[in-house]
Image (cartoon, coloured by chain):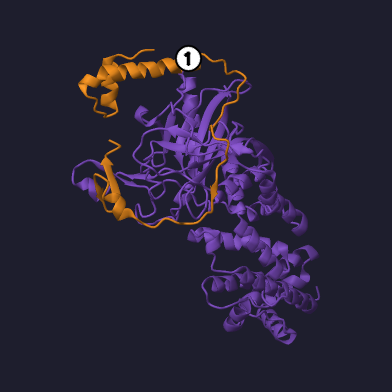
Chain colours: A purple, B orange
Amino acid sequence: MEWETVIGLEVHVQLSTKSKIFSGASTTFGAEPNTQACAVDLALPGTLPVLNEEAVKSAIKFGLAVNAEICRESVFDRKNYFYPDLPKGYQTSQMDAPIVGAGVLDIQLSDGSSKQVRIHHAHLEEDAGKSLHEGSFDLHGHGMSGIDLNRAGTPLIEIVSEPDMRSAEEAVAYLKKIHSIVTYLGISDGDMSQGSLRCDANVSVRLKGDDTLGTRTETKNLNSFRFIERAIQVETQRQIDVLEDGGKITQETRLYDSERNETRPMRSKEEANDYRYFPCPDLLPVAVDDALIEQLRNNLPELPDSKRTRFENDYGLSVYDADILTAERSIADYFEQTAAAADDAKLAANWITSELMGRLNKEGLAFNQTPVSAAQLGGLIQRIRDNTISGKIAKQVFEALWNGEGSDADAVIEAKGLKQVSDSGELEKMVDDVLAANPDQVEQFQSADDKKRKKMLGFFVGQIMKASQGQANPGMVNQLLNEKLGG
Amino acid sequence: MAVSPSDIEKIAHLARIRIAPDQIDAVADRISDILAMVDQMQAVDTDNVSPMANPHDAVQRLRKDEVSELNQRDRFQTLAPRAEDGLYLVPKVIE
C-alpha cells in the first residue's frame, strides 16, 4: 500500500513589540519572574485591555506579505480554558473574524521545485505565562508549581495553513519561509530557542489517490526545524503502522518527546475540546482602513522571494546560492555588502556559503555573530582578484581575520608576509632551482608526449608552490615552466 | 427550562458561592426565569442576521506601543496566597 501524508501547520509567531498586546508591560525576554506582569496581565479585577497599535500593524504586514485579504473589521474572542498560567481563565484570541484572511506562500524544495501552500487565515492573540514544575518551592514537599506571568499577554500571530503539505520536508520548507518572512518584515526576531516561533502539526495519512482526508492528530511542542521534521516523520510512521495493523487513528492531541523521538498522547486532562468561544465584551471591533493598509504596503521591505529573483538575475547566482543567501535578511544584506566591497558577486557568494557559513556552523554560531565583517571579507576577495594572494593563502588570511589578528586583509597579508610572489626574477630563480634539483623528471618530461606533459607539469608547479610556501603566483609559474622546458 | 433547589446548591458549591439556605428557593426561581428568557430568545429566527460582536456603535481605540507599566511585583504578590522567588505558587499542575 502506498500512503500519502497530509500536513497542516499552525505557527505561533511572537511579535517583537516593546509592550504587550493589551497592556503597557514590557515584553523583554529573560527578565526576573513576574517583574513584567502588570495588573492587566494578572487579570486583577477592574482592569481592561487596550490594544497595541504595533501588534495590529505587524499582523497586517504579514497579511500583505502573503497576499492575504485584510479584514476591515476584525473581532477578538475569548477562548475559555483553565490553567494557572492563564489568570483570566480565557485567552483573548480571534475566531470568526481574524485580522488576516486567506493567503498563499511559495515554498522552495531541495530538488529545485517550488510549491504553493495556502494559508487559511492568521489571527492576533496573546501568549500565556509559564509554569515551572521544578524549583526550590517544590522541595518543601508541598507539590507546588511556580507561575511566571512575564510572557502572559505577549502578542502573537497564529498562522494557520491549509492541509497542503505532503511531507516533513515540505513542512520544514514552509516553516522556514514563514521564519524568513517575519524576520524580513521585522515583526518578530524569529528566535526559536526563545520560543518566538512555535509550531503545532496536524498530520494524517491516506492511501494515495484517496480524496477524503484521514483522521488527523495534532502534535504540539515543536520548537526547532529539526524536531518538526522528526516529529512529523515518526507520527506519520506511527499512523501508517496503526492503519496497516487494521487499527484506527484517534483524533487527539499528542506531544513530541525529542529525547525518545516519539509522539505520545497528552492526557485527556490537558485537552480542552470545548473552548466556549464568544466575542470579548471588553474589546470593540478593530477597524482597519484602506489608508493604513496602503501605507503599510508601500513601506514593506523587499521580501525573500523577490530578493531571490533579483539575486539570480542581477548577480547571476545559482538558484541554490540565491536560496541560501536570502534565507535571512542579515545574510542577504551581508552578501550585498561583501559583493560590493569585493566587486565580484560570485566569489562573494562562494566565500559566504562555503568558508564563512561552514566556519559558523562548526562553531555553532548564528550568522549575525560572524567575527568577520562584510567589509573584511570583501577586501580579502579583492586581494584574490588582483592576484596579491592565491585562493589557498586567502584561507589563511580568512582564518586570521576570524581570530581578530588584523583589521583587514591587507594588514594580515602585510604582517604575515603572505603576499604572492609575482616578481619574475624571484620566480625565475625558484623555477631554475626546482628544475636543477629534479634532472630525471626534466628528462622524462622532454621525452613525453603532450598529454603526459600536462600531467607532469603539475609536479613542477607543486614543487615550486611548496618551495614558495604557497606564495608563488601560479599563473606566472606555469608560464615560466613552459618557457624553460620548451613545452 | 427550570432549575431545582438541589441544582442551585450544586452550582453554588462548584462556584464556591455561599447561598443562605432560606434563599435557595428564591434563587432557583429567579434563575429559572432567566433561563426561560433565554429559551424565548433562542426561538427567534436569526438566519439572515449577521452576528454582532459588540452592541456599541464604536471601534477599538489603539494604544501606542510604549512600556508604561512599572514593576510592582512586590505589591501584587502580597495579594497572592503564596509566592516564592518571585513566582506565584499554585498546587502542582502536573503529576
Q: Is residue A459 left or right of A361 when viewed as pictured? A: right
Nearest the camera: A248 or B86?
A: B86
Q: Chain of mark 1?
A: B
The quadrant of the image that shows the N terminus of chain A is: top right
Return the x and y of residue A387 as percentages of the image width and height.
71, 75
Return the x and y of residue A330 as percentages of the image width and height.
60, 59
The quadrant of the image that shows the C terminus of chain A is: bottom right
- Residue B38 appears in which quarter of the rendering? top left
Nearest the camera: A478 or A113?
A: A113
- Residue A447 appears in which quarter of the rendering? bottom right
Residue at 36% x, 16% y is B32
Return the x and y of residue A411 as percentages of the image width and height.
60, 81
Nearest the camera: B68 or A130?
A: B68
Name the residue carrying label 1.
B40
Label 1: element kind:
helix
Return the x and y of residue A54 as percentages of the image width and height.
56, 51
**A484 in relation to A205, above or below:** below
Nearest the camera: A446 or A144?
A: A144
- Residue type for callout 1: Gln
**A385 in relation to A118, above or below:** below
**A161 in relation to A274, above or below:** below
Is any atom of residue A460 visible in this view? no
**A284 in relation to A391, above or below:** above
Residue at 55% x, 46% y is B61
